[in-house]
Amino acid sequence: MSDIKREDLDAYLDDALSETDIARVEQALRDSETLRRTLRALIQERDRGEHSIGAIWRREKLSCPTREQLGSYLLQVLDAGLQNYIDFHLHTIACPYCLANLADLQALQREPEAQVQKRRQRFFESSAGHLHPGKDTRK
């Protein structure tokens, strides 16, 4: 019998496992018809709306910092408590959603200034046509 538990399958469906644990679960699923049946039953429960409080928290990302908070975390301008919480969330919990957001923000930080200015110019140009000086659009 596999050492994979229902909690592991829940985390697998929530994409809340490390790459190593994902590989371990997927190997166990290939090897065990019983485990595949358990996974199918779990998916059916979710489709019917039967959720645990933990699943709702993970799905709705209630404990995840906002993208703005992650950016402030990178700049280290948050108060110590929030800075420590985000550090815990990223490095101890290893939330895949927040780690992906953080990696994206880090990549943006490394962009050359010319590329940043070009992107800002494109944003401005794409919205400039929607702005009408002197025209009241609140009607």
Image: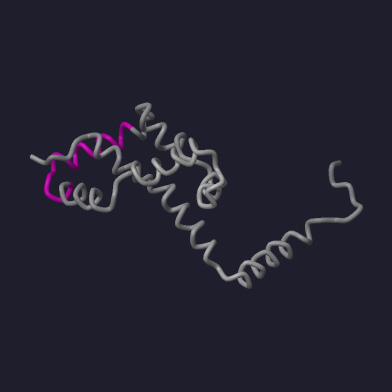
Residue sitting at the far right? 134
Q: What x and y, as percent, mark residue 78?
A: 55, 42
Left/right of residue 36 with respect to residue 89 in the rendered view? left
Q: Which picture quadrant has residue 56?
A: top left
Whole-percent x and y of residue 93? Answer: 34, 41
Q: Residue at x 40, y 41 (%)?
A: 89
Tell me: residue 56, above or below residue 23: above
Residue 43 within the magenta-colored segment of the rendering: yes
Bounds of the magenta segment: 29-45
In this view, the residue in front, 121 or 1, is 121
The x, y position of residue 130, in whole percent, is 78, 57
Q: Residue furthest front?
A: 80
Q: Is residue 125 left or right of residue 103?
A: right
- In the figure, 113 relative to 67: above or below? below
The colour scheme of the drawn protein is: one colour
Q: Is residue 118 magenta?
A: no
